[in-house]
Image (spheres, rainbow, N blue to C red):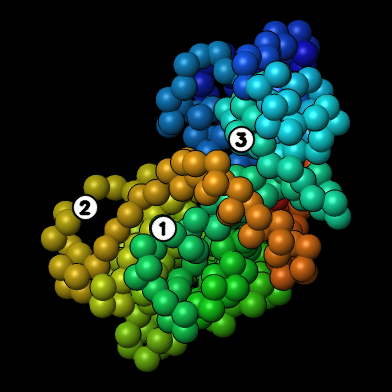
Amino acid sequence: MKAAVVREVGDAHALKVEPDFPTPEMKPGQVIVKNEFAGINFIDTYHRKGLYKRDLPFVGGQEGGGTVAAVSDEAAAQGVKIGDRVAYSILGTYCEYSAVPAAKLLPVPDGVSMDVATSCVVQGLTAHYLTTSAHAGLIQEGEWCLIHGVGGGTCQWAAQMAKLRGFKVIGTVSKGKSENASSLGCDELIVLDEVPGMAYEDYESFDIVSRVMEVTDGKGVKCVIDGIGKSTVDISIDSLAHRGIFVSFGNASGSVPAFPVLRLIGKSAYVTRPKLLDYITTREELVERAGDIFGWLQDGKLSVCVDTTFPLDQAPEGHLYLEAGKTKGKLLYEI
């Protein structure tokens, strides 16, 4: 089968499209999905560069959507049928066929297109746990939340979901993506200069902490959702309210450097570094989160922007586009 494979870690060109990579064998409890789309996410670039270690060689990606092409007896007993439209998350989705445990399948409802459904899996589920669970209930309805980088990707979803949860939202965004972000419903939008060729804004171009304190009447925010990393860690911590929580989930500008826990004492603040897999540990939790997302989409409460779809043959170009900060929405490969 055709697949985009990493045999040596490196830049985007380490992602090589191979026409005859072995098609996966179906194991008990699995199905074979003929992929229509695969999502492109920042975590894929971390795997490709070796920041997050994986055994070599590996097929890139961890988000896919398509049609069930073969079903094991165990999966059939769970009601899965050939021809079912499904989305899912496993490692290795930049390929024509994936062997997927039936427990990880998300049935795609009528009225939700496959490109949108595929977009929901990693970014949508990540935004869901960030706004519903990762803050551990330390923010309540009517309280302030700061979300960095709402102009695209996961935090475009998170801003909308935070509003659905009843939070008041301050979003940061680059000038080039501000029009896109203006439709998300943020209560306050802080527009920043761009860093040319990078996937994040210039967080030194504006005094964000002062503006946050002004907007919140000097109290700060109860939760910061931060996928930027190195460039925003100080801003995020300094923007917190008393007993607020810093949720650090990404590294777009580089990994968050180590800092002494004593730094949190001024406001008795909290910090967490979560990952998606720890918030979909059971089938029930996965389906519940996906059900919320698909329901919001069907009700018109959630808007998904698919920015660009690349053919799989242009696998390096997809990563280059993402890392250059050009995206204003979801990036996909069409298989």
Residue pointed to by mark 1: 134
Q: Nearer the viewer, residue 144 or 182?
A: 144
| Residue 103: percent from left, percent from top | 60, 34
Q: CA distance from mark 1 to mark 3?
A: 21 Å
| Residue 185: percent from left, percent from top | 64, 77
Amino acid carrying label 3: it is Lys
Q: Quick check: can you spot residue 279?
A: yes
Q: Which quarter of the rendering shows the N terminus?
A: top right
Q: Earlier in the sequence, mark 1 or mark 3?
A: 3
Amino acid carrying label 1: it is Ala
Which marked residue is nearer to the observer: mark 1 or mark 3?
3
- Residue count near mark 1 (Cα–Cα under 10 Å), binned few <14, some 14–19, many ≥20: many
Residue pointed to by mark 2: 259
Residue contact between numbered discs 2 and 1, judged by CB atoms under 8 Å: no
Q: Quadrant of residue 50?
A: top left
Q: Earlier in the sequence, mark 2 or mark 3?
A: 3
Residue pointed to by mark 3: 104
Residue furthest to the bottom in view is: 217
Give the secondary structure at mark 2: loop
Q: Quadrant of residue 17?
A: top right
Q: CA distance from mark 2 to mark 1?
A: 21 Å
Q: Nearer the viewer, residue 69 or 243?
A: 69
Give the secondary structure at mark 1: loop
Q: Quadrant of residue 27?
A: top right
Residue contact between numbered discs 1 and 3, judged by CB atoms under 8 Å: no
Residue name at image x 33 percent, y 66 percent: 245
Q: Which quarter of the rendering shows the C terminus?
A: top right
Q: Quick check: can you spot residue 95?
A: no
Residue name at image x 58 percent, y 53 percent: 288
